[in-house]
Image: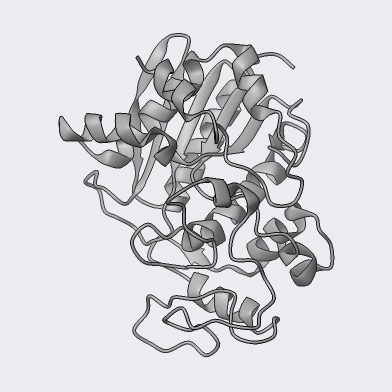
Amino acid sequence: MSDFDGIVMVDWSGGNDTGPRPRKDAIWIGESGPAGDAPPLYARNRVLAEEMLVARIEAALELGERLMIGFDFPFGYPRGFARALTGTADPFAVWRWIAERLEDSPRRNTRFHLGAAINRRFPGIGPFWFNGLQEDIPDLPRRDIREGHGMSERRACEDRARGSFSCWQLGGAGAVGGQVLTGLPVLDRLRSRFPGRVAAWPFEPLEAPVALVEIWPSLLKAPVAQAAARGGIKDAHQVRLTARALARLTPERRAAMLAVEAPEEGWILGLGHEPELCAALD
């Protein structure tokens, strides 16, 4: 496997269009490589973000480059969920299942209703919770009153990632569940649009020109906080610094961080290597 020519990091959002003016809690895309950092790009909604990513992949393929593209949401659910939902432990079956059912546009999406629909396939109450809409949604509790659904609360990597949120929480400050339900369909479409040219870690060998990886910018919490204290938007700093840290590692160190076995749940790239990532920024 050749090394990467570009490291692209994406701070995702499960919310609606955030308007023309760059702001926090929106989608931001940062890139770094041998030539240094590119200015972070603001995407006001997921449609535009997907178009930007498709264009970047097409440019890389035309130039014969290899790209790593990171997204800040889980690529998989706790063990057993995929089989319970789709009949197979294949995480890509979950990606396709969600992609076929989520209705998504810049100004609305059905992530809360989809969470409720999934809950109805499980016993008890849950596993998804939190309803950010004014209307009540049957089978989706607003509060964490879940019980008897049979799923683990966290993935193995999240047990080690202090401060991370469960993928079952669909909204609220810091929650990631809505990002998963709106992000996995995009990953599924990227794999389908570029068959054999896009591979998702750690579910398949990274022999394709483009590698999709899961990130968690809080691994660089201190450097991001220091940058934000000097001004600017935190989300933009997160993608810029995460891309820079990964780009500055040697190919051998990146390969070591990618040497993970998590065929169903997925993993956070760089987890357990936080001091090394922070040191790469010095």
User: In the rendering, at what x and y percent does residue 7 appear?
Assistant: 51, 24
Q: Quadrant of the N terminus?
A: top right
| Residue at point 48%, 84% (across, down) | 141
Could one spot residue 61 in this view of the protein? no
User: In the rendering, at what x and y percent does residue 99 appear?
Assistant: 64, 61
| Residue at point 78%, 34% (across, down) | 196
| Residue at point 51%, 70% (across, down) | 111
In the displayed structure, 134 sits above or below 38; it is below
Residue at the extreme right of the image, as rendered: 88
User: What kind of colouring is applied to the model shown?
Assistant: one colour
Depth check: 111 or 100 in front? 111
In the displayed structure, 197 sits above or below 177; it is above
| Residue at point 72%, 66% (across, down) | 81
Left or right: residue 270 versus residue 97 is left
Left or right: residue 187 versus residue 192 is left
User: In the rendering, at what x and y percent does residue 83 appear?
Assistant: 80, 66
Left or right: residue 59 versus residue 208 is left
Could one spot residue 189 in this view of the protein? yes
Quarter location, residue 251: top right
Q: Quadrant of the C terminus?
A: top left
